[in-house]
Amino acid sequence: MLNSNEAKHEKTVNVSEMIAQNKKKKSISNITEKLIPTILFLLASITILTTLGILFTLLSEAIEFFKRVPIWEFFTGTVLKPLSQTPEFGILPLITGTLFSTVIAMLVAGPIGLMSAIYLSEYASDSVRKVLKPLLEILAGIPTIVYGFFAFTFVTPLIRSIWPEVGATNILSPGLVMGVMIIPMIASLSEDAMNSVPNAMREGSLAMGATKLETTFKVVIPAAFSGIIASFVLGISRAIGETMIVTIASGSSKNFTFDITQSMQTMTAYIVEVSGGEAPAGSTIYYSLYAVALTLFVFTLIMNLLARYISRKFREEY
């Protein structure tokens, strides 16, 4: 049996140990709290440093190209013959190929993606949504090289059976398939934007006598317009940067034409062609790779900045 003095001493020791343990835990917690922001800052800085590194590489190599080829000639030239004995480096054939493929893709993905989002958000039941949305998103998980061979071996022969004037390689077929690939992006982001609209707005519209369709197009879509526009702009950026589909199905003809039935080359396809061993290091065609890549970088940067601006502008209005 412990006497009262010994019991008091043991309690004092236990309390002292508890205080010491709490101080130790607080000390460790304080150190962790100080380290976490630093670690997160370093991780966030990786993306910034990577972007700056890419930009520095593109600029330094593109400047070397523009020392050999005038910048005005590059951006206004309609002839691209990098491997000719008298090479010409006009980027307009690549820009028209990129723009045509993007426009065709968005003409497919825009309406279908938006209508799919409207159905999933406003009309589909929970059980139907749980089935359809994963099926729709499967399209986003298919490798782009599979889409490319699908466009070349199935879509192009199908189009030629209906429209014989279409070439064996053309910009129409990859544009259509790119549109199918982009549908899940537009549908998913647009649906999320529409789901974020408060139900009170829908109920108020219905209570005023509006139909379901009127409520969707006059209340829900205007309220979610910033998110919908952002999804479209991101879809355009995705189409501009697509590589494998256009490389396989659109051919490598550097034609400056407005005929979508003919073979055209996009900026990404040209980068693949040049980086595949066609150009010796240090040659003009080698440096043209970086000039085209820099132009593509500027295109995608403008589209992303535009998406942010539009999203912020319409969010403030609504």
Image: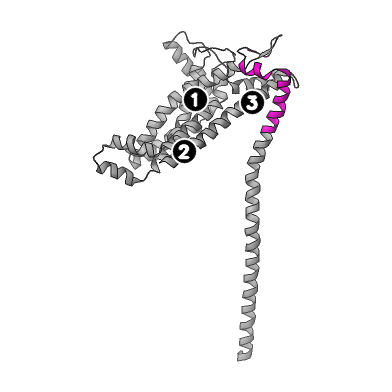
Q: Amino acid at mark 2?
A: Lys
SS class, disc 3:
helix
SS class, disc 1:
helix
Q: Position of residue 142 (x, y in %)?
A: 51, 30
Q: Amino acid at mark 1?
A: Met
Q: Is residue 14 magenta?
A: no
The residue carrying mark 3 is 293
Is 17 located above or below residue 83 in the figure? below
On the picture, is 289 further left or further right than 97?
A: right
On the picture, is 49 further left or further right than 95?
A: right
Task: Identify the residue shown where x is 25% and y is 44%.
Answer: 207
Comparing labels 2 and 1, the label whose residue is closer to the camera: 2
SS class, disc 2:
helix
Comparing labels 3 and 2, the label whose residue is closer to the camera: 2
Q: Amino acid at mark 3?
A: Ala
Task: Identify the residue shown where x is 53% and y is 29%.
Answer: 237
The mark that comes first in sequence, 2 or 1, is 1
The residue carrying mark 1 is 178
Q: Where are the magenta residues, as a range?
A: 55-82
Q: Position of residue 121 (x, y in %)?
A: 36, 39
- How much space separates mark 1 and mark 3, taking CA atoms? 20 Å
The mark that comes first in sequence, 1 or 3, is 1
On the picture, is 221 further left or further right than 89?
A: left
User: Image quadrant for the C terminus?
Assistant: top left
Is 25 located above or below residue 218 in the figure? below
The mark that comes first in sequence, 3 or 2, is 3
- How much space separates mark 2 and mark 1, taking CA atoms? 29 Å
Residue 238 appears anywhere in the view: yes
Residue 248 appears anywhere in the view: no
Specify few, some or many for label 1: CA neighbours under 10 Å numbering under 14, 14-19, or 20 or more: many
**Residue 313 numbered mark, or none:** 2
